[in-house]
Amino acid sequence: METVTASSILISVVCIFVVTGFIKAVNWVWLRPKRIEKWFRQQGLTGTSYQFLVGDMKDYSSMRTRALENPINGFSNDYSSRVDPLGHHHAGKFGKDYFVWAGPMPMVSISKPELIREAFTNMQEFQKAKFNPVMDKLFPGLVRYEGEKWAKHRKIINPVFHVEKLKLMLPAFRDSCSEMINKWDMVVAETGSGEVDAWLSLTKLTADVISRAAFGSSYEKGQRIFELLKEQTDLSLVMLQSLYIPGQSYLPTPRNRRFRKLEDQINDLLCSLINKRKEEIEAGEAVKSDLLGILMDSNLKEIQQAVGNNKNKHLGMSLQEVIEECKLFYLAGQETTSILLVWTMILLSKHQDWQARAREEVLQTFGNNVPDFEGLNHLKTVTTILYEVLRLYPPIIQLSRMNKQKDTNLGALSIPSGTMITFPMYSVYRDIEIWGDDAQEFKPERFSEGISKATKGNNAFFPFGWGPRICIGERFAMTEAKMALSMILQRFSFELSPSYVHAPMSVIFLQPQHGAKIILHRF
């Protein structure tokens, strides 16, 4: 009798778990999405009807594949149908703000600048979106932290990008630019002109800059780290394009095994460098003026302060956290600057008048001397050009946030918890109500009186984000870009090669799909 009773209880418990799990699954894949869809429509927000389990992902995948098959005819700054065909289609059908579905997860697209600023400022309610663990590996460190941990890391990292520290990194910028320009000189040596793929060159340049700036005299090891990170990034992008199934990263697939092996190799190299620096600091040696040295010094001071105040919970970064911040230096710093520079060269190739104006300013400021920090800060024409490039070809065409904890209001819109909110920078930067009828045109003069004037007081320009989480490396990236562009303009004039194919492609960052073939002329 007791055995029967125990068996009955066990069966009942199992049935309860099964039924509960089934109800939760049905709610997740069908009932909740349909309720949210109805709620959005009642608020006057339009969008797509939810399709069981897949949402709009099937349409997104097929439309993107077709869009990337053909480049843009001629040369046009209107490329939304290529980089975001689904968003382009929905914006034309539903207007600036609408909702779609990433599987059962709702996604609301918001283009109103005031709502973007509100979401970026309210970082407690609207946090960084996390929908695939691969992204946490691809972009570790500060960008994925929230709350107290984010505040602690931000405080420790701030000194790394202080203007006085940045000045000490100019030799790294100069040496890397000189190496690239010397290689380009060899290309034009015989006839005074020659063709290069600027995308490949500039990717190598910015990787070299980060290696030197991050690790100083150990930058050769930094270059090896970058090579491994590049392979890991390429592998991550392949993994991100497949449907994510919770727990799949733990399966012993060839991709997962290779990913983990790369991660172990990167961690070992970084751990070796960090431990060596730690030993040098403990031995009383002067702190090196590279990113790693400044970061470790700032971290040590944070730990000492916490110990002195008996606040152990506020101790600085662990070894693994320092490693993750070093990875972030590479992935964020290298990609964004190389993309800014390549689109700048492409647009200045198309607009020779602005190339001439930029060169004139550079030569008036520096002559043939190596650019200095003060001079770089006073390059007005070059700055307006870089801003206009960031507007027309933003490194990241879409930013996102998520309200994870509870239902939240954004403006007059009530947004259910678990909703991803996307901000299509491409659309915001093409809005004729903000930028005028010439919003698709390359006109750097729009920034001649500052960002506020360019946006008619709308504050609708977010090249490095907005609010508390604004990119900490903004000054670093802009200084590097100005240095590289100035040194190029001092030595060369350039134009697009007849073989250049205009094909912007967004794979996390906005890249030229078929490279950037440029013809250099010795200046």
Image (spheres, helix red, strand yellow):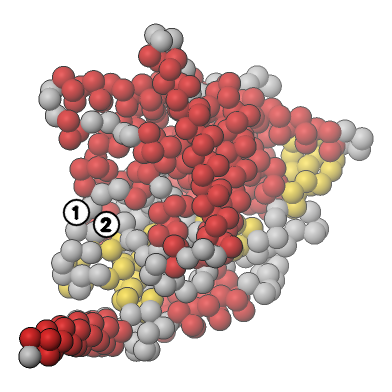
Does residue 86 appear to the left or right of 179 in the view shown? left
In the image, 329 versus 462, the foreground residue is 329
Across and down, in percent, residue 170 comes to 54, 23
Can you say whether 380 is above or below 285 in the image? below
Q: Residue at x 36, y 38 (%)?
A: 321
Q: Are marks 1 and 2 in contact (CB under 8 Å)?
A: yes
- Badge 2 crowding class, 10 Å Cα cut-off, few under 14, some 14 to 19, many 20 or more, is many
Residue 157 location in percent, x, y?
A: 34, 32
Spot occupied by residue 373 in the image (x, y as percentages of width and height): 50, 23
Location of residue 43 (image quadrant): bottom left
- Residue at 37% x, 89% y is 51
Residue 428's x, y, as percent? 40, 63
Check disc 2 and give the amino acid type.
Answer: Gln
- Which secondary structure, mark 2? loop
Residue matched to label 2: 127
Name the element at disc 1: loop
The quarter in which the N terminus is drawn is: bottom left
Q: Which mark is residue 124?
A: 1
Q: Can residue 482 be spotted in the picture?
A: no
Amino acid marked by disc 1: Gln
Q: Nearer the viewer, residue 493 or 410?
A: 410
Report which quarter residue 19 is drawn in. Answer: bottom left
**Residue 154 or 178: which is nearer the viewer?**
154
- Residue 115: give its label: none
Identity of the residue drawn at 84% across and 33% down: 186
Question: Mark 1 Cα within 10 Å, few/some/many (few <14, many 20+)?
Answer: few
**Compared to 514, does 190 lie above or below?**
above
Instruction: Tell me: residue 106, above or below residue 314.
Output: below
Residue located 23% across and 85% down the image: 18
Q: In the visual, does 260 lie left or right of 124?
A: right
In what quadrant of the picture does the C terminus appear?
A: top right
